[in-house]
Amino acid sequence: MLFNCGNCGLTREVSEKFANKTVKCPKCKASVNIGAGTPQDNHRYSISEFIKRTSQKDKGQGKFELESEYLLEVNLNDLVWTKMGSMIAYLGNIKFTREGMLEHGVTKLLKQAVTKEGLKLTKAEGQGKLYLADTGKKISILDLQGESIFVNGNDLLAFEGQIQWDIKMLKKVAGMLAGGLFNIKLEGNGMVAISTHHDPLTLTVSPNKPIVTDPNATVAWSGTLAPEIKTDLSLKTFLGRGSGESIQMKFQGQGFVVVQPFEEVYFQSR
């Protein structure tokens, strides 16, 4: 017998003893009446059941809401900045404009040219619903309330137009050596969406508890922190006898660091 929650879409097999009974959905706690069984079971793969299970649902969560763990819905009524290539669908009257060379001023243009920062933005303006995804990565929404956060450029999916942003260079020498240790600082009031490979892990940094991370696995950190780049380049490293973790980020102070269980290839340590 098939259990099918019309509220959250959870579907699973249940025992016949639950036929014609009302039970609580284990995922969203909604009350679900389980039918007599046979007719429902025979149609579990029908088009109508597929549409019911996968159809868009308004959750009333605000401008940014998660349609699923991997899909962001933007309820657009002005403008947002999105990662180029992240739009998968939209409805309504929305205009897309690629980020212009002088869109954010000469200073940011020069920083992008020097750092070769990989972040490319598209401006979405208008009214409607916009759906974004990032190669199947898991999406998290952050509501900045006068706060600031640093995000790896490749892991920034979208942010509201009123958010202020800038490219930050962690350390010139280490940046050139590693291929570019550059991140985006976002601050102000508004929504920011980031993406991670699998579930993110947030580590708390305190004055007596510094955190050291692999730059390739580091997604974001609080604006209160200024990481130090640690290098361990020695003769052993070049001969292939080093630790394999030649470049590290050390966070000290008060704040948090977000990492992912995946190492994206940005930095070539030898």
Image (cartoon, grey):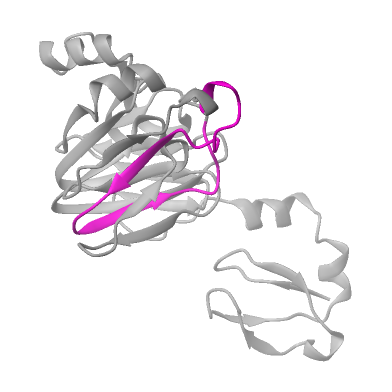
- Which residues are drawn in magenta? 237-264
Q: Is residue 104 left or right of residue 176?
A: left
Residue at 58% over, 51% down: 55
The location of residue 80, given as percent across then percent down, is 26, 34
Q: From the viewer's perspective, is residue 56 above or below residue 124?
A: below
Q: Is residue 75 left or right of residue 27?
A: left
Q: Is residue 16 left or right of residue 241?
A: right
Task: Using the image as rendered, state which of residue 129 and residue 124 is in the foreground.
Answer: 124
Q: Is residue 270 left or right of residue 167?
A: right
Asked if the stretch drawn in magenta spans residue 248, the answer is yes
Q: Is residue 122 visible?
A: no
Identify the image quadrant of residue 81.
top left
The location of residue 171, given as percent across then percent down, is 24, 27
Q: From the viewer's perspective, is residue 43 above or below residue 12?
A: above
Q: Residue furthest front?
A: 235
Q: Is residue 108 visible?
A: yes
Identify the image quadrant of residue 177.
top left
Q: Looking at the rendering, in which quadrant would you find the N terminus?
A: bottom right
